[in-house]
Amino acid sequence: MANILVVDDELGIRDLLSEILFDEGHQVELAENAAQAREARLNMRPDLVLLDIWMPDTDGVSLLKEWAASGLLTMPVIMMSGHATIDTAVEAVKIGAQAFLEKPITLQKLLKAVEQGLARVQVQQAMLAAAPQPLSSTLSISSLVVHETVATPDVQQSFELDRPLREARDAFEKAYFEFHLAHEAGSMTRVAEKTGLERTHLYRKLKQLGVDLTRSKRHS
């Protein structure tokens, strides 16, 4: 599903995270220090990085700064630590980290953070694909689902980019939620988990966008 780089100086943590992520279908590369992480970043081009803060040679925050300064922070980075302060976590997020996981890391929090990070990658890729449109004002949503292996009905939609921003954003959000509803067979619980929204907020959002919930259930 995704290439994930795990950077941690503790062998037990590396093995545990690798086993969990591998069971979820991901390809996992391991690094025990910043030097190995730099090499892996260049060789494998990870879709997401799990980065420990406290390491013996170069700490995770310094490595994060290095990647940001050199233009290599092109993937979501989730920081990990059992001893970091709130200030350290805030600093990492300001630099560009997507999230912070406190050790010991629970399975649920790990998988949720990874899922949200990979979802953000797909959205960013779609936005980049939408930016250069010199010959046409229409954008296909097919670029959003290029990495999906599950056949999902009714995802081929188009967006007119010359519309007002609010209308264009609403059209994108409607297609985004319709895709996840179809993919999850209409399960509001799973869609809420996928999109990171509370169920009540999700219902309001779908009603506001005019999403037909009966369609996704008919496809299940």
Image (cartoon, rainbow, N blue to C red):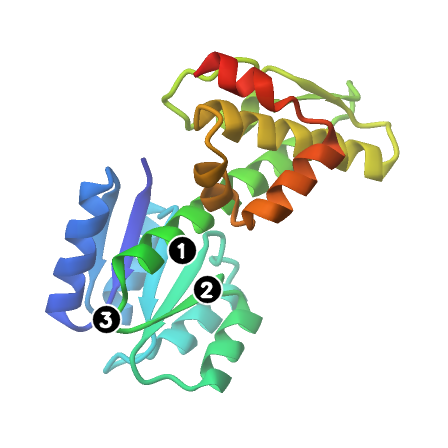
Dot 1 or dot 3, earlier in sequence: 3
Q: Left or right: where does residue 48 sit relative to residue 124?
A: left
The residue indicated by pointer 2 is 99
Relative depth, front residue between 83 and 124:
83
Q: What's the residue type where badge 3 is placed?
A: Asn
For image coordinates 23% across by 82% down, the residue present is: 56
Dot 3 or dot 2, earlier in sequence: 3
For image coordinates 46% across by 42% down, the residue present is: 194
- Is residue 146 in sight in this rendering? no
Q: Do the residues labelled 1 and 3 touch (CB within 8 Å)?
A: no
The residue indicated by pointer 3 is 33
C-alpha distance separating marks 2 and 1: 7 Å
Q: Are marks 3 and 2 in contact (CB under 8 Å)?
A: no
- Is residue 65 in sight in this rendering? yes
Give percent across and percent down for residue 85: 42, 86
Q: Left or right: where does residue 64 sit relative to residue 108?
A: right
Q: How crowded is mark 3: few (under 14 residues within 10 Å), some or many (20 or more)?
A: many
Q: Do the residues labelled 2 and 1 touch (CB within 8 Å)?
A: yes
Relative depth, front residue between 146 and 16:
16
Give percent across and percent down for residue 102: 34, 73
Numbered disc 1: secondary structure: helix
- Occupied quadrant, residue 31: bottom left
- Label count reads 3
The residue indicated by pointer 1 is 113
